[in-house]
Amino acid sequence: MTRTHRLFQLMQALRDCPPPATARDLAQALEVTPRTIYRDIDALRGLGAVIDGAAGFGYTLIEDAAMPPLSFSNDELEALVLGLREVGQVGDPALVQAAQSALSKLRARLPAAQAHRLQHAVLTARRFAPLPEPGIDVTILRQATWDERTIRFDYCDAQARDTRRSVDPLSIVYMQASHCLLAFCHLRKDFRAFRLDRMRGLEIIEASFRPRRVPMLREYWAQMQAKVAS
């Protein structure tokens, strides 16, 4: 790990840890020694970060020099918190962690009064019925969708019939009861929705369908809207 990378990680740890963060806690998070943390704190202060505290007392990030203050209305702030907390409830593990990190970065960039409002926001999101666990790595699926790469997987439908599918992934939709992949299915030669908890053995094929994902998705949404309207 380069020192630059470690300094970035330390800044993120200071955002994430409840203040004051002790050198021991920070050292465990970064897998370094407390002595390294002391040196890196001095380096961050030299770069302009305002970090309160000292060895033996813990550290609190007061002002993040890497992130200039943002300005949101109170309603905008509540909307951001609600959206990120919803991701924390419905997202896969990587998205849950990303939402938590985004909240901590927002808190570091906001003026003190709004940072307090963010931390104690009125709106929140809760789901008491657990969603089915995806049968594949959703992080890989998201990347394949973004890269517009054809994928292959085993699928078990509602009638417990198993098929091997090759599809062009278009979008992942987080629904009330399950998460679904919207795709163009090569087997059926049509658009289909696949529940992530019924997918297994995900493979990425070399074939690319770039740059057709957006127009294909637009066509799929239009078809679904027409079915609802009819």
Image: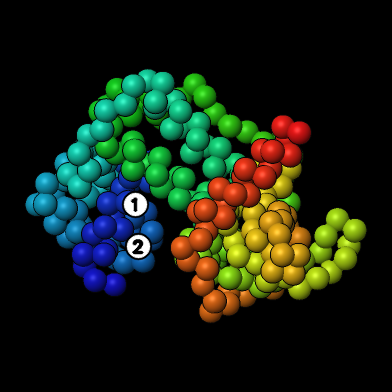
Q: Which mark is residue 51?
A: none
Say if 17 sits above or below 10 in the image: above
* Residue occupying the point 21% across, 67% down: 3
Q: Is residue 153 left or right of residue 26?
A: right
Q: How far apart are labels 2 and 1 at the CA level? A: 8 Å
**Residue beneath the point at 39% across and 25% down:** 76
173 lies left or right of 70: right
78 left or right, relative to 127? left
At label 2, the amino acid type is Leu
Q: Which residue is mark 1?
A: 13
Pinpoint residue 121: horizontal percent, then vertical percent. 45, 25
Q: Secondary structure at mark 2?
A: helix
Question: For mark 2, what is the residue?
Answer: 30
At x 71%, y 54%, the residue is: 193
Write the residue at 76% across / 33% down. Answer: 230
Q: Of residues 155 and 74, which is closer to you in this image?
A: 155
| Labels 2 & 1 near each other (Cβ < 8 A) | yes
Q: How is the image coloured?
A: rainbow
Residue 133, percent from left and from top: 70, 55
Residue 206, position as x, y percentages in the image: 53, 79
